[in-house]
Amino acid sequence: MFLLALLVGTGVVGFKILSGYSWINALYMTVITMTTVGFSEVQPLDDASKIFTIILILTSVIIVGYAISVITEYILSRNNYEDLKIKKMQKEMEALNNHIIICGYGRNGSQAARKLKAYKKQFVVVERNKELLQKLDEENILYVNGNANEDDVLKEAGIERASTLISALPNDADNVFVVLSARQINSKLTIISRASQETSYEKLKFAGANNVILPDRIGGDHMASLVVIPDLIEFIDNLSIVGKSNINIEEVEVEKLYDTSAVKTIRDLDLRKKTGCNVIGFKSPEGEYIVNPDADINLVPNSKIIVLGRPEQIQKLNSEFNLS
């Protein structure tokens, strides 16, 4: 509609200026030219007006033809809104790269999605429960309706281009199958899986999962810790709670902070002065973690730092270094 309006406007102004038509005659000439109905011109055209008319006709054939195809598709599909919505989601998913796939949108899957959304990470959910699909619709989350055990469904979610897969299905056998399939399709994929039974831990690791989470064990440990060290656990819980803007901890690749051709130290970055954030952790390229690292530690390529701060300080860090 915008292209058609632009074309009409260009035609009217062009005929008005080049041929000196009145506004109504300019509009009349534009419409009969665009629709190629073959009516004669209002008055003879000079060479400049003829060239303009030729350009308008050629442009109209393309734009009007495109507009008709789009409008026709809309009219034919207006009774099947789901097809249009699915087609739109497919286009958005095809444009994703290095995204995250969440298999299952139950308690664990929805919690993972909420946190990823807070960190503005791109992700796709694979789910087949109709009630949960309706919830995904309401939350404007990209999803694939299907069984995560099927390779075609994983490929539709873009597993070949994804960076991470989270398998949060309620059945351990299903999670094992998903991990096996995902690892076979994308060998570089980081895979995180949940497990209900401790006996499934080794099976999932053997199948190719990088990390296996046991929600029941974590929940039991957490409750016991609230008895032993309640204040400390509540403090840590407050750090890990994520809402729309209350992010307190951030992991940052050093390459995003400065040009690593000239190695800097934590002191050189001076994040405390610039953003108010404190560096509380360092991860070396070899995967070694250092808690409360020294200010003189070298921030070498492929290393990361973990920073702590209030939500507004984390936002300032992201703005200062264009991290988000």
Image (cartoon, rainbow, N blue to C red):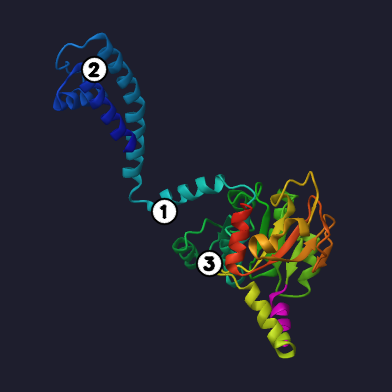
Q: What residue type is labelled 3?
A: Lys
Instruction: Pick out the residue farthest to the bottom.
Output: 227
Looking at marks 3 and 1 on the same chain, the residue that comes earlier in the sequence is marked by 1
Q: Are marks 3 and 1 in contact (CB under 8 Å)?
A: no
The residue shown at (20%, 16%) is 19
Note whether 285 is above or below 37 in the view shown. below
Q: Can residue 321 be seen in this view?
A: yes
* Count of marks placed on residues: 3
Which of these two is toward me, 8 or 57?
8
How many residues crowd mark 2 within 10 Å: few (<14), some (14–19), many (20+)?
Answer: some
Quadrant where the N terminus sits is top left
Distance from the alpha carbon under mark 3 to that under mark 1: 29 Å
Mark 3 or 1, which is nearer the eye?
3
Q: Where is residue 5 in the image (x, y as percent from the top left)?
A: 28, 35
Q: Which residue is drawn at 33% across and 51% down?
A: 79
Q: Mark 3 points at which residue?
A: 244
The magenta stretch is 214-224
What residue sits right under mark 2 in the picture? 18
Residue 143 located left or right of residue 305: left
